[in-house]
Amino acid sequence: MRKFCSLTFVFTVLLFASFARAQEPQVDIAGGGSTLWSSKNTTASEAFLPPPLKGGTYPSVFFQYLNAKDRGINIEGVFRYHKGIYNNFQFYRPVIIDANGVYSHRLATKTDGDLMAGAGLMTLLFYGVGSCPLPAGGCSANLNSTHFLVHAGFGVRYYAWRNVFIRPEVHYYFIPNNHEFHSDNLFRLGASVGYTWGRH
């Protein structure tokens, strides 16, 4: 009887532990690189035509939390690694940060898909040109322009080794009143390498 009770206790603990593990959250952290693409206006007759926001190398990082039902949040940020040249005149650097609701789905044994949608901000850092007119200095190094954005994205996490994954991804941003550039529509294409804790 004592052995039976001991085995029952051990079995109950193992069953509870496996159930608790099934309820554990999943956390993904990754870094990667990407590039931007947007359309260019070829028919406008304006004397000063805003340029398209495209090209360049954009390092990225993201944090993702999923509950036991594979739903959660995703926070990511990207910035242009080298300064761009705005209309061949002024240096600038875009920085994009967004927060999303995310749904993950198992596509194959080593492959999960992440579908996300949310909102965020794009800040443009426009760096000053020319010399400072003040004798003592103190001029601002840059001028910021910040815009609200709506984001949607999709990525495929492939687990190449244990909990290490590679995630090709595509992102779409709608940036209303993005008057510094030609289009309010922006795409980002890239890939990330990351690690998962508690994969479901």
Image: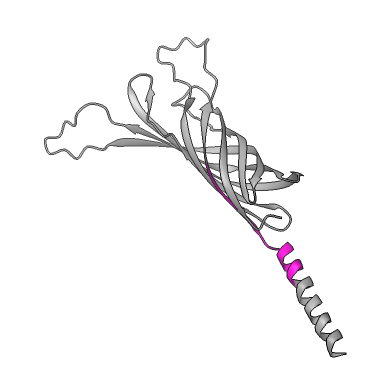
Q: Quadrant of the N terminus?
A: bottom right
Give the vertical position of 182 relative to 170 (above or below): above
Query: From the viewer's perspective, is 170 left or right of 41?
Result: right
Give the vertical position of 62 relative to 189 (above or below): below
- In magenta, the rendered stretch is 17-31
Please report the residue visible at 52 percent of the width from the left and 17 percent of the height from the top: 40
User: Visible in this render: residue 128?
Assistant: yes
Please report the residue visible at 74 percent of the width from the left and 62 percent of the height from the top: 22
In which image quadrant can residue 89 be found? top left
Q: How many marks?
A: 0
Q: Position of residue 118 (x, y in %)?
A: 60, 43
Q: Is residue 21 magenta?
A: yes
In this view, the residue farthest toward the front is: 3
Give the vertical position of 89 relative to 161 (above or below): above
> How is this picture coloured?
one colour
Please report the residue visible at 12 percent of the width from the left and 39 percent of the height from the top: 136
In which image quadrant can residue 91 be found? top left
Q: Is residue 68 magenta?
A: no
Q: Position of residue 68 (x, y in %)?
A: 72, 58
Q: Position of residue 96 (x, y in %)?
A: 48, 39
In this view, the residue farthest toward the bottom is: 2
User: Visible in this render: residue 152?
Assistant: no
Query: From the viewer's perspective, is 106 left or right of 184?
Result: right
In which image quadrant can residue 133 be found? top left
In this view, the residue farthest toward the right is: 1
Q: Quadrant of the C terminus?
A: bottom right
